[in-house]
Image: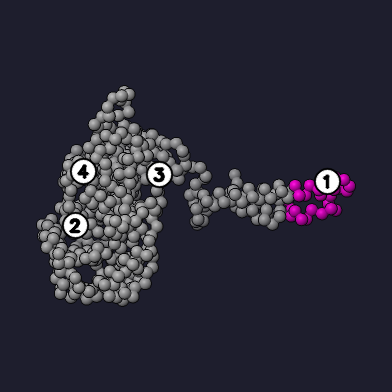
Amino acid sequence: MLRPGHVRCLLRRVRAGVPPGGSRWGSLRGSSLPRGAPGRALRASAPLRADIFRELGQGLERLGQTLKDQLPAMRPGGWGGWTPPGTSPGPRPPEEADVVVVGGGVLGWSVAYWLKALEGRRHGMRVLVVERDPTYSQASTVLSAGGIRQQFSLPENIRMSRFAAAFLRRIDEYLGVPDEPPIDIQFQPSGYLFLAPTEAAARLEATVRLQREEGAQVALLSPAQLKERFPWMNTEGVAVASYGLEDEGWFDPWTLLNAFRRKATSLGAHSCCGEVRGFVTSARDLAPGEPSPMSARIKYIHIHTRDSLEYQPVACSIVVNAAGAWAGKLLEEAGLPEGLRQPPLPIQPRKRYVFSWHCPDGPGLSCPFLIDTSGAYFRREGIGGNYIGGMSPAEDEEPDPSDLSVDHSFFPERLWPLLAARVPAFAALRPRSSWAGYYDYNCFDQNGVLGPHPRLENLFVAAGFSGHGLQHAPAVGRALAELLLRGRYESLDLARLGCQRLLDGSRLREDGVV
C-alpha cells in the first residue's frame, strides 16, 4: 500500500531529478557506461527516459493531490479517520427501518430521542435519521442566534417555550450520557425585550396578558421605566415594552443538537448520510388506467449517497418529514402523484443574515435580546463588548436562497442606522463578521406544521417553524413521539398545528415572528 509518507518521498525525489530507487539523473556519467555503440544508444535515449520520469512525476503529483483531498488535518497519533477515495464517509443506509426521520437537525434528532426514550427498550423500534450534510455547514440549527423566549402570541407557542425552558433546566437528566461530562449549553439568562410603537401598544399589552395567563413571567415597561432600567437606550418612538423576567435568553445551538444526537444514538437510534429523493407508495400497485387514489402509504424511501449514482431503497413503516427549509421541496420532488401532494406544504427556505460587531461602550452585561420597533434585533455575544444582530427584509426584498452568501451592504445601508438610532453608542461600532442561515419559513401563517399528512397515511410533518424551531424542538419531538407511539398528544395539545388548517385555510396568528 502506498502511504502518505511514501508519496511525499517520491515527490521530493522526482522534483530533485532522482528516479525511484536510483541516483540523480545528472549523475549518470560516461565512465560508468559500456564503451561504443551501446553507450551512444543509451545516451540517445536520454530524452525518452526524461519523458518517462516527467510523466511519473505528474502522476505522483495527481496522486498526492488526491490523498491531500481525502486526508484530514494531521492529528496527534497519526492520520486519524482517513476516508479512502470512493468510500462513504458514514454508515450505509440500512435496508429497512421502522421510523425514518428525514432531516438530522435539532427537530429531527429530538423526534428520534423522544421515540427511543418513550419506547423504553434498547433494541425495540429501529429509528433511522437521514442527514444529507454531516458537517452541518448549512444547517439552520447551528447558524441561528440561539434564542429562547416565552413571549409569543399563540398559546401553543408559549406552551412549547415553557416546556423547552423546563427541559433545558434539567437537560442532564434527559440527555446526559453515562461516563460523559455534564452538558453545558452556555445559557445566558438575559430576557427578550420587545419595543412597541403607539399603534402596536394595545396589541402588545393584550399579548402580555395572555403570556401571564399561560404562566410566563413578563413585565410591561413604560418609556420612563425603560430608560431607568436601560440608560443606554434611546426610547424615542416607544410607547410600551415587554420584558421577560425568567426562562428567556440564548444558548449554544450546536451543543443542544449534539446532545440530542448523542443521547438518541446511545438509546439505539441509527443515522446515515444521504439525501431522500423519492418515495415508493402503495399507489404504485394500481393497475394502469386506474384513477389516482385519495390516500396511500409510503412503502420505501430512496436514499442517495454522495459516493454513488445509485440509491438505496429503505423499507419503512413511518416517515417523519423534518427536512426544515426543504420540507416542502421534499414532497414536490419525491415522485408522488399530484393528488397525494395535496395540500402543498407552504414551507420554503428564507435566507437571513446575522452580523457581528464590536462596541466597547455599548450596553454591556445589561443587554437583553432586544427586538426594536423597526424589526431589527440584537443581543450581547460574550462579555467583551461584542454583539450580534440582524433583521428580516421586506417581503419584496427577500434575498436569493440558492446559497448562503451575505449581502454585506445590508448592514451599513439597512441595519446599522436602525441600531445607532436605538443605541447611540452603536454609531461608533466596528463591524467584525457575518454569516447567513435559513428559516424554514411557513408562507401560510409562519407557524409550525406538526402531525400526520392528510393524504400520505404514514407520513408525519415537523417543519415550518419560521425561526423558532430550535427553541421549540424539545416540545415538538415529545409531542410527535407521543402521537406516533400512543396515538394522541399527552404533554401538550398541539392539534391546531396540524395540516388540516392548510386544507381549511384557517391561519393561526403569531405576532412574535422576528
Q: Which label sits in the foreground, 4 or 3?
A: 4
Decide: marks 3, 1 in contact (CB < 8 A)? no
Q: Secondary structure at mark 3?
A: strand
As shown in the figure, which amino acid type bears the numbered disc 3?
Cys
Q: Name the residue located 69 percent from the left edge and 57 percent from the top edge.
A: 16
Nearer-N-terminus badge (1/2): 1
Q: Is residue 351 visible?
A: yes
As shown in the figure, which amino acid type bears the numbered disc 2?
Asp
> For residue 30: magenta?
yes
Number of callouts: 4
Cα separation, mark 4 vs mark 3, equals 32 Å
Cα separation, mark 3 vs mark 1, equals 59 Å
As shown in the figure, which amino acid type bears the numbered disc 1?
Ala
* Position of residue 28 measured from the top left corner of the image (x, y, whole percent): 79, 53
* Position of residue 393 measured from the top left corner of the image (x, y, whole percent): 29, 59
What residue is pinned by disc 4? 502
Nearer-N-terminus badge (4/2): 4
What residue is pinned by disc 2? 511
* Position of residue 341 measured from the top left corner of the image (x, y, whole percent): 28, 37
Seen as rendered, the residue at the extreme front is 396
Q: Quadrant of the N terminus?
A: top right
Badge number at residue 273: 3
Residue range (magenta): 20-48
Q: Name the residue located 38 percent from the left edge and 60 percent from the top edge.
A: 406
